[in-house]
Amino acid sequence: MEKRGQYYTIDAFIALFVIAAGLILALAFHSFGHSSIQPEALSQELLNTFAETRISEVNNGFVLRQTGNGNITNKDNTVLQQAYEFKQYFDSRPGVGYKPEQFSNLSAELLESVTGGTIPPQYSFEVIIDGDVVYTRGSGENESRILVSSKQIAFGALNRTQEFWGPVTAEVRVWE
């Protein structure tokens, strides 16, 4: 009679071990899956930063140089508005003497100067304004497992005049 109780006890411990091992393995495989929560938050916050930060609030060498040489005329513009103006407005003004590539580069430099080292290095991102890629940091978008996009509408006035531009779509794509 005592031997039967020992077998049942050992059998119960073996069954408990098998069930515990199965649960641990199942939960371990689930926990290593990629989460899209961080890229989603990063994409939305980056777009909000561009759309809400005024040029007058940005204190870096690039913005000071562009303000000093007259390329930035309205310090009340947001970073997103100024990037669009660099990209679009100066391209379409005949006789200004600037090449379109120069202002597209200014858009990229502006966005790079604002983001600086604030984005973790494992994330890559690109900023698309009105369908054109204005700035890209990193590569491998096609090989990425997670690609998150946030969009927002932007519009503005040129030099505080009655000449309005927009609405245009601004998009930030983030991938890991």
Image (cartoon, rainbow, N blue to C red):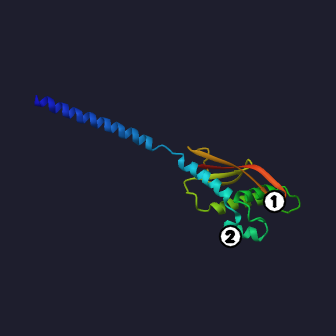
* Residue 45 rendering spot, x and y as whole percentages: 60, 54
Q: Secondary structure at mark 2?
A: helix
Residue type, label 1: Leu
- Label 2 neighbourhood size at 10 Å, few (<14), some (14-19), many (20+)? few
Residue type, label 2: Gly
Quarter of the view holding residue 27: top left
Q: Residue furthest left?
A: 1
Q: Which-is-in-front pick, marks 1 and 2?
A: 1
Q: Residue at x 56, y 49 (%)?
A: 39
Residue annotated with mark 2: 61
Residue annotated with mark 1: 158
Quarter of the view holding residue 69: bottom right
Q: Are marks 1 and 2 in contact (CB under 8 Å)?
A: no
* Residue 1 rendering spot, x and y as whole percentages: 10, 28
* Residue 106 rendering spot, x and y as whole percentages: 73, 61
Left or right of residue 162, residue 151 in this image: left
* Residue 64 rendering spot, x and y as whole percentages: 71, 70
- Label 1 neighbourhood size at 10 Å, few (<14), some (14-19), many (20+)? some
